[in-house]
Image: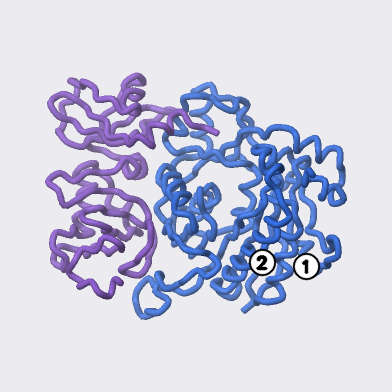
Chain colours: A purple, B blue
Amino acid sequence: MSDDTAPDENWGQQFDRLPPTTDDRVVEGRPSREEVIDWWDERFGVDPAVFDGYTFWEKGAGKIWAFNGEVVDPIEVEGLGMRILRTRQRHWKPSTNAVQRFCGDATKNVVELSPSEAQAFVDGHDQQLDRWEGDWGYLTAAHEIAGELEPLGVGLYLHGELRSTVPKGRQEDLVKLD
Amino acid sequence: MNPLQRYAPLVDDEEAFFAACERPLPSVVRVNTIKTAVARAREALDDEGVAYEPTDWHPGILKLEDSSPGTNWPYFHGWLHGQEEVSALPAIALDPQPGERVWDTCAAPGSKTTQIAAMMDDEGVLVGNDNNLGRLSALRHNAERLGVTNLVVSNQDARNFSMKPFGERTPEKDGSFEQFDRVLVDAPCSCEGTCRKNPDVLDEWTMNHVKSVAGIQKGILRRAVQVTKAGGTVVYSTCTFAPEENEAVLDFVLDREDCEVVEWDVPDGFETAPGITEWEDDEYDPSVTKARRVYPHHNDTGGFFTAKLEVTA
């Protein structure tokens, strides 16, 4: 089936590997590996070396996955590593799971929440946060646990308000233990 | 009939066996080393006032004293995963290494899959397959919460698993492969071993189901051996005591595929019994004694069966 698709189309049922750089780009609008790694560095200060072993893939328009291994390109499977980023829109949006996985040592745009703020954030509530004087946009929300800061997820900071983007399924994870 | 009666002749202490099967199972969590260290996870549980006891044989597998501790930050962060103690055995027998290619044939909901990912340091190619799309979504959710990034999720019937998506027919392309280093077959089964968690399995048990599921098990294990490279490892596990689904399946596949049963290192302090060579009117290959049976009264766990095979050609 994939054989019927011209190589310059973005095909929703398969994973296509990102080109190394924008100069290598064949598919219109597809971000490059370099752009994705630069984005994590510029936004959160994530060391590009963290992604050395990773390959990056697009499935469906703008949904970027990071996979810590090598497979054939393209590949028709149900999942490939972790969804890390939504691109092909003005402000790229990181995923909760990716921020938890890769922003443990983030140096930029990390907002530390108090215990009650952390609880509200994970419950999906938006909250006033006038003390934040950094950038607007997507932040790593973090709290202290076992003596160190740990990322909770992605907050969208606009007009003095921190909006929680923690997905419903992850909100339930706070209480589920069996 | 209580199907457990069938297995009374197999156990060393009938009374202890039946008594253990009646008791509820302790809640157990595994520390997910992809996202944190064992010491930090334990510190977080201490801070939350969640009481636990590490198991004798694994510092990262913790028995909780209260089964529902409520709000739990370490769980939210994906530092912990609820996993029955005995179900940590097959990944230990499989012994996956970072960078390898590994296939988990019946992966959902992913306790063993995510344990394998952690043992691989989250590097390489781990294919988590399940034939049920609904169960696959649970696998995805668990894998993402636990921060797994080396998992390929696939939705095939494991009995005729196709290597075509992985580039079997295009070996010239980068990243293509046609065989795995290791495969786990944690097979669908009649599950009496989980009766401490889910007593309904005993009421629903039928001999017909044993017979039909044994056919599926044989098909999956054969395919697993076929797609594993020579010298590679296949682990076969179930949570049933039924010899028809355990030793008989091994015996069937030993006759038809290039593989042999090998010993595996059971963790110190974990009691097991050897696989059996005779059951009702059947006899099995003597090498199936290298497989390990786990009865609930041995270590206060569920029941389990784990065999390690080496692929010879």
The answer to whether B53 appears left or right of A173 in the picture is right
- Above or below B78: residue B170: below
How packed is label 2: few (under 14 Cα within 10 Å), some, or many (20 or more)?
A: many
Identify the amino acid type marked 1.
Answer: Ser
Residue B118 at x, y percent in the picture: 50, 50
Count of picture labels: 2
The answer to whether B280 appears left or right of B57 in the picture is right
> Residue B302's quadrant in the figure?
top right
Tell me how far mark 2 sits from mark 1, CA to CA.
Answer: 10 Å
Residue B239 at x, y percent in the picture: 67, 50
- Above or below A144: residue B33: below
Residue B41 at x, y percent in the picture: 50, 34
Residue occupying image coordinates x 65% and y 65%: B215
The answer to whether B163 appears left or right of B248 in the picture is left
Label 1: which residue? B287
Label 2: which residue? B309
Q: From the image, which quarter does the C terminus of chain B lie in?
A: bottom right
Residue B6 at x, y percent in the picture: 82, 50
Identify the amino acid type marked 2.
Answer: Leu
Identify the subunit bearing mark 1. Answer: B
Identify the subunit bearing mark 2. Answer: B
How packed is label 1: few (under 14 Cα within 10 Å), some, or many (20 or more)?
A: some
Q: Secondary structure at mark 2?
A: strand
Q: Secondary structure at mark 1?
A: helix
Q: Earlier in the sequence, mark 2 or mark 1?
A: 1
